[in-house]
């Protein structure tokens, strides 16, 4: 499991560092643990309130990891139409 703060921009220094972390953990799962042959789940928890998480989902999926965003429970959740 990888836990990281979601930066406001994936192109910032923090964003690039998070992507490098995901890449290195993914490489350990893929090469060191046998990739899909490993009977486990690789999970990335992105903690933050950003709305566009496509970059993070794609980055995690590329390395065989599942992405889950963790938001504050005080923030209202919006559906794909912008409603609550």
Image: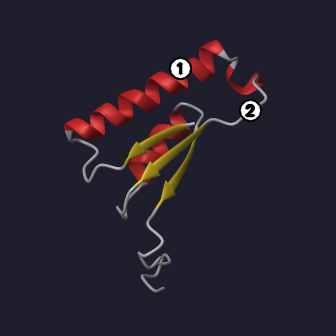
Q: Which mark is residue 61?
A: none
Per the model, the C-alpha gap separating discs 2 and 1 is: 15 Å
**Vertical relation: 21 (above or below) 84:** above
User: In the drawing, does residue 37 fall left or right of residue 17?
Assistant: right
Q: Residue at x 30, y 32 (%)?
A: 17
Q: Hey, which quadrant is residue 72 in on the image?
A: bottom left
Label 2 with label 1: CB-CB less than 8 Å: no
Q: Secondary structure at mark 1?
A: helix
Q: Quadrant of the N terminus?
A: top right
Q: Counting other residues with Cα less than 10 Å from the Cα at mark 1, is it few (<14), some (14-19), or many (20 or more)?
A: some
Q: Nearer the viewer, mark 2 or mark 1?
A: 2
Q: Is residue 6 left or right of residue 67?
A: left
Identify the residue at horizontal 53%, vertical 26% (top origin). Answer: 26
Q: Earlier in the sequence, mark 2 or mark 1?
A: 1
Q: Position of residue 63 (x, y in %)?
A: 54, 30
Image point (36%, 63%), residue name: 49
Q: Is residue 66 above or below residue 80?
A: above
Q: Nearer the viewer, residue 81 or 49?
A: 49
Question: Looking at the picture, how far across and down is residue 23, in whole percent?
Answer: 45, 27
Q: Which residue sits at x=70%, y=17%?
A: 34
Residue at the spot of label 1? 27
Q: Quadrant of residue 18?
A: top left
From the top left corner, tell me how far across and down residue 22 is, in percent: 45, 32
**Which residue in the structure is indicated by mark 2?**
40
Q: Element under label 2?
A: loop
Nearer-the-camera pick, 13 or 62: 13
């Amino acid at each position: 499991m990888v836990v990281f703060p979601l930066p406001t921009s994936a192109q910032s220094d923090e964003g690039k560092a998070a992507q490098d972390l995901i890449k290195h953990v993914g490489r350990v799962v893929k090469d060191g643990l046998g990739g899909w042959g490993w009977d486990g789940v690789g999970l990335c928890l992105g903690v933050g309130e950003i709305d566009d998480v496509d970059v993070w989902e794609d980055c995690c999926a590329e390395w065989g990891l599942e992405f889950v965003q963790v938001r504050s429970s005080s923030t209202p959740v919006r559906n794909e139409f912008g409603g609550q």
